[in-house]
Image (cartoon, rainbow, N blue to C red):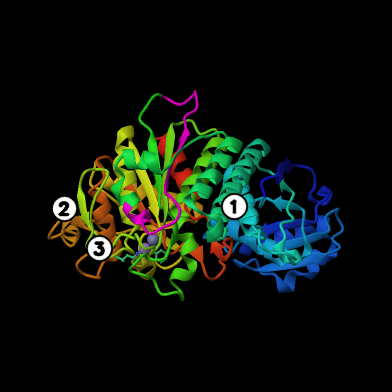
């Protein structure tokens, strides 16, 4: 996946020498499009007309086109009035699925000649859609079937009337983003027994060395020195020590300004601790409880590879949450890194314990903004489902602007987010009788919001909280997202930061 080669071609479509040529078409322009394609596909394109109406998700595979391509996929974009980047990603993904069993190594992506999207955005969306759909996780397959084996090597974007340089830049960005999403998916999908905090931090160090961001890993002794009581409390039931990983991207050409800090929840496996989770539909996918961390690592990878012109820091507190004999217990009062005290009433509300320490540590950077991503609550899945994450923010200057910018990045990338409110009364449910705060609410309702209100106590800068419990890990495949780890948040963060930097 990392070595896919991307280029553009401007010659006739018939000249594209690829295993699969993908031609997206708008619904109301199907007849005209098939006419144009007749030069490549010959009569077979016209013969396919009765079976192809250009509606969204319509997809037909043709063989022996008269050009150099071995196969031609006609894919629908739906009516042009409703179409956008997401239609292009879905169309490319639909073509990928049609040919998934055939071991396609080279792909041509034909930009729609009459596209509404600019060449840059259209090329990016097509490459993302294809590559994100072509992701395979074959690490543990001893005899993978062809459809389980990664085969993609080369993508050629065909530019008709559009700007070829812009298309190439867009395609390159799409390739880097898709590869970074793949890295995040791999981190989530890897078996928990290979994913101790130490092993995870090592994988981050490898990615940093390969792609050019720096990585510093704190071991348990340093975490103790810093007084990260929340992270240490959660770690008590585990055989594996915790880590605290700092990723730094600070290119020479970045202005000397306070950084944006990204924070990701790194619970490598969440058993619930002594407040043990049941297995089915609960503990069975808790290897994904580090998906926030994976999103931060994937975003740092992409920002470095894209030579992003700003200072960005990534922080990951990492531990697993287990019920070992020394485990923290309900009733424990924990002194956090910030100095505040927390009464633990449920050991399964562990994410907020480790994130609180990372958030108060983040203040040492005097950040202009902190964006924190975590698989924090089951309530998020109940509220918004598995395709939309929850976004919340504190009342530091202009909360509306921040939420709106994040929702817009969501719509551009398809990593959808929707806001939840943060009215003060929700926070009252987190007051403890014996300590400053308790780690669960005194009522079940509004669980995603009360969790965020807890975290808010550890912020003193503009902060965006994204609860991605649902969309970070899927039990059913979606158009360009496989089952398992999705890499949700990587493209969202990078898109948001690009828009934020150009403000
Ligand atoms: N990691 C879970 C949240 C989660 C649930 C993530 C489903 C992905 C899918 C988190 O640590 C947790 O256990 N939260 C509890 C909090 C409760 C004890 C207040 C929850 O949501 O039930
Ligand atoms: Mn938990
Ligand atoms: Zn958890």
Q: Where is residue 402 in the image (x, y as percent from the top left)?
A: 33, 46
- At mark 1, the secondary structure is helix
Left or right, 113 with respect to 297, comes to right
236 or 423, which lies in front? 236
Say if mark 1 contacts mark 3, CB within 8 Å: no
Left or right, 105 with respect to 479, comes to right
Q: Disc 1 and disc 2: Cα gap in Å?
A: 41 Å
- Which residue is labeled 2 in the image? 436
Quadrant of the picture in which ligand 1 is shown: bottom left
Is the residue marked by circle 3 packed among few (<14), some (14-19), or many (20+) residues within 10 Å?
many
Q: Position of residue 453 (x, y in %)?
A: 24, 55
The structure residue drawn at horizontal position 77% and vertical position 58%, both measured from the top left corner, is: 104
Q: Is 384 within the magenta?
A: no
The C terminus appears in which quarter of the rendering? top left
Q: Position of residue 346 (x, y in %)?
A: 28, 65
Ligand 1 closer than 8 Å to label 3 CB: yes
334 or 348, which lies in front? 334
């Amino acid at each position: 996946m990392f070595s896919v080669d991307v280029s553009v071609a401007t010659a006739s479509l018939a000249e594209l020498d690829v295993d699969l040529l993908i031609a997206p078409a708008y619904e109301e322009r199907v007849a005209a499009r098939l006419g144009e394609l007749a030069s490549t596909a010959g009569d077979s394109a016209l013969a396919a007309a009765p079976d192809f109406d250009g509606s969204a998700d319509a997809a037909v595979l043709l063989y022996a086109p008269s050009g150099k391509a071995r196969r031609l996929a006609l894919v629908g974009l739906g009516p042009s009035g409703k179409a956008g980047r997401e239609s292009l990603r879905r169309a490319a993904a639909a073509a990928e699925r049609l040919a998934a069993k055939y071991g396609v190594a080279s792909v041509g992506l034909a930009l729609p000649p009459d596209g509404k999207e600019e060449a840059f955005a259209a090329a990016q969306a097509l490459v993302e859609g294809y590559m994100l759909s072509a992701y395979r996780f074959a690490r543990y397959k001893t005899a993978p079937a062809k459809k389980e084996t990664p085969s993609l090597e080369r993508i050629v974007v065909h530019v008709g009337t559009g700007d070829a340089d812009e298309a190439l830049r867009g395609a390159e960005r799409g390739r880097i983003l898709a590869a970074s999403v793949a890295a995040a998916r791999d981190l989530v999908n890897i078996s928990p027994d290979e994913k101790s905090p130490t092993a995870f931090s090592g994988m981050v160090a490898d990615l940093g060395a390969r792609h050019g961001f720096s990585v510093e890993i704190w071991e348990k002794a340093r975490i103790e020195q810093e007084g990260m009581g929340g992270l240490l409390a959660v770690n008590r039931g585990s055989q594996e020590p915790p880590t605290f990983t700092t990723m730094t991207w600070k290119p020479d050409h970045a202005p000397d300004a306070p950084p944006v800090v990204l924070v990701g929840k790194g619970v490598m496996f969440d058993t619930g601790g002594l407040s043990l989770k049941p297995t089915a539909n609960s503990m069975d996918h808790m290897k994904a409880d580090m998906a926030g961390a994976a999103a931060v690592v994937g975003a740092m990878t992409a920002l470095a590879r894209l030579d992003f012109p700003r200072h960005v820091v990534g922080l990951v507190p990492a531990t697993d949450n287990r019920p070992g004999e020394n485990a923290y217990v309900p009733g424990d009062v924990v002194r956090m890194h910030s100095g505040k005290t927390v009464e633990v009433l449920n050991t399964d509300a562990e994410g907020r314990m480790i994130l609180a320490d990372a958030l108060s540590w983040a203040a040492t950077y005097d950040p202009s903004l902190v964006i924190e991503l975590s698989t924090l609550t089951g309530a998020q899945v109940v509220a918004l489902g598995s395709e939309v994450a929850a976004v919340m923010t504190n009342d530091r200057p202009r909360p509306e602007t921040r939420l709106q910018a994040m929702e817009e990045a969501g719509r551009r990338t398809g990593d959808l987010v929707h806001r939840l409110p943060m009215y003060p009364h929700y926070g009252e449910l987190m007051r403890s009788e014996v300590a400053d705060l308790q780690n669960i609410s005194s009522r079940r309702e509004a669980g995603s919001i009360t969790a965020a209100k807890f975290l808010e106590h550890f912020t003193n800068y503009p902060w965006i909280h994204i609860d991605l419990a649902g969309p970070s890990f899927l039990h059913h495949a979606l158009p360009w997202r496989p089952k398992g780890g999705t890499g949700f948040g990587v493209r969202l963060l990078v898109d948001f930061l690009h828009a934020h930097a150009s403000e």
